Amino acid sequence: MKKKYSFFSVLKNSLSYHENWKKMWRSPEPRKSYDIIIVGGGGHGLGTAYYLAKEHGLKNIAVIEKGWLGGGNTGRNTTIIRSNYLWDESAHLYEHSLKLWENLSTELNYNIMFSQRGVMNLAHNEHDKKEIKRRVSANKLNGIDSYWVDKNQIKKLVPIMNTDNLRYPVLGASFQPRGGVARHDAVAWSFAMRADEMGVDIIQNCEVKNIKTSKGKVEGVETSKGFIRSNRVGVAASGHTSILAETAGIRLPLQSKPLQALVSEPIKPVINTVVMSNAVHAYVSQSDKGELVIGAGTDGYNSFTQRGGYNIIEDTIRAIIELYPVFGKMKMLRQWGGIVDICPDASPIISKCDVKGLYFNCGWGTGGFKATPGSAHLFAYTIAKDEPHVINAPFNLNRFISGRLVDEHGAAAVAH
């Protein structure tokens, strides 16, 4: 039975000081076996379980998370959502996701605070202009809302921007009006609630240590709570996916690096869109609480730390202040890092592998959050059917053998 969140339920529970709300999902102990195990309790993993149950009628499913739900990259990002990627394969993938975002609050009966305030990508030099205009044209051919805006139009959209600064002069930008931001923890919670209602076991504080295989088939996972048997395992563990893959004898073409972000003290509304700068990999939006959410680039080394190097923060802040001098005297409240897994072509992997019953959803780099519902929807299809959906077929593991890469380094904004 779907939990109802409405004005009347909020009013009723306010009379008891909001102490009688039912728990959003169960916290069961793991069973000895499941039909399907999803490793990773972020948005991708929880969404996959939800779509497996809702669209494919599969019920005996477990989501296993080593910490708490949404405590990994789902809660450690800047929540930007867009679909203005260059290549057809990427455009179809992210547009599929964006269309799901647009109806997700209604489908899950939970306000994920999806705000379509638009996403702008700045051009600082002639190369940027040509690359961004090329991408705008490619987007239009794929039916994606994207257009070029000149400096005067940018000043109207973002009056506080210093477009004539000496270090990073602004020559124009692409703009996708349907892009925006969403509340990351609400996404994880809503998928968890709806999956739980359909019988999915969500097991927190249970670390998967090994994926056990035999004779080319998956048998289950060894966890901190014992061995759990299953003949189908889907791994959506972001930066730690390559480590788990190695336990099953699979070597994935991934590099894991810290990706940093920070937020400021809250202020009154000053910027009503998302502004990204690929040239310096600095991007900014303003949260509903008034905080500036500032994103940086990946560190220049492989690491599993969730902090990252201070030089990245310093470089990002210098660029942000150059573009927005009004931010110069603001205080930063907190900083964090997520562990992103990056493929050689800056595109993801949604694929089965040589081990029967083992599937991977990884390699999202800096673009994992924006793909959450689309990634989960397609991963669920791939696991349920044991074959890819037409949209995620190009993102299979075999492309690193055939050479049919989806090279999205520019549009993905992966700074390396």
Image: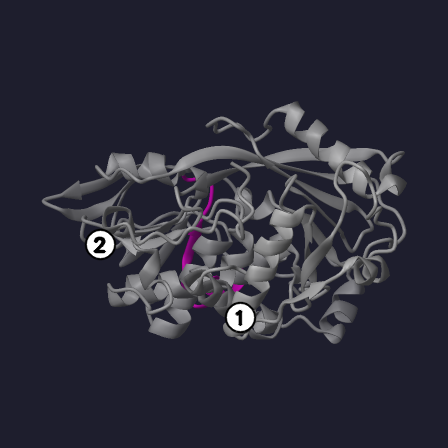
Could you tell which of marks 2 and 1 lies nearer the N-terminus?
1
Q: Which residue is under mark 2?
A: 357
Q: In the rendered structure, which amino acid carries the disc numbered 1?
A: Leu
Q: Is residue 293 left or right of residue 408?
A: right
Q: Position of residue 142 (x, y in %)?
A: 50, 72
* The one of 126 and 184 positioned closer to us in this rendering: 126
Where is 236 relative to 59, above or below?
above
Res 109 seen here: no
* The one of 250 and 312 positioned closer to us in this rendering: 312
Does the magenta-highlighted stretch encompass residue 203? yes
Q: Which residue occupies 49% across, 33% down?
A: 257
* The one of 122 and 63 positioned closer to us in this rendering: 122
Q: Which residue occupies 44% across, 60% down?
A: 375
Q: Which residue is under mark 1?
A: 100
Q: Foreground mark, 2 or 1? A: 1
Which region shows up in magenta?
192-206
Q: Is residue 414 left or right of residue 184?
A: left
Q: Position of residue 203 (x, y in %)?
A: 43, 48
Where is 107 relative to 332, above or below?
below
Q: Quadrant of residue 90?
A: bottom left
Q: Quadrant of residue 83?
A: bottom right
Res 265 seen here: yes
Q: Position of residue 195 (x, y in %)?
A: 46, 63
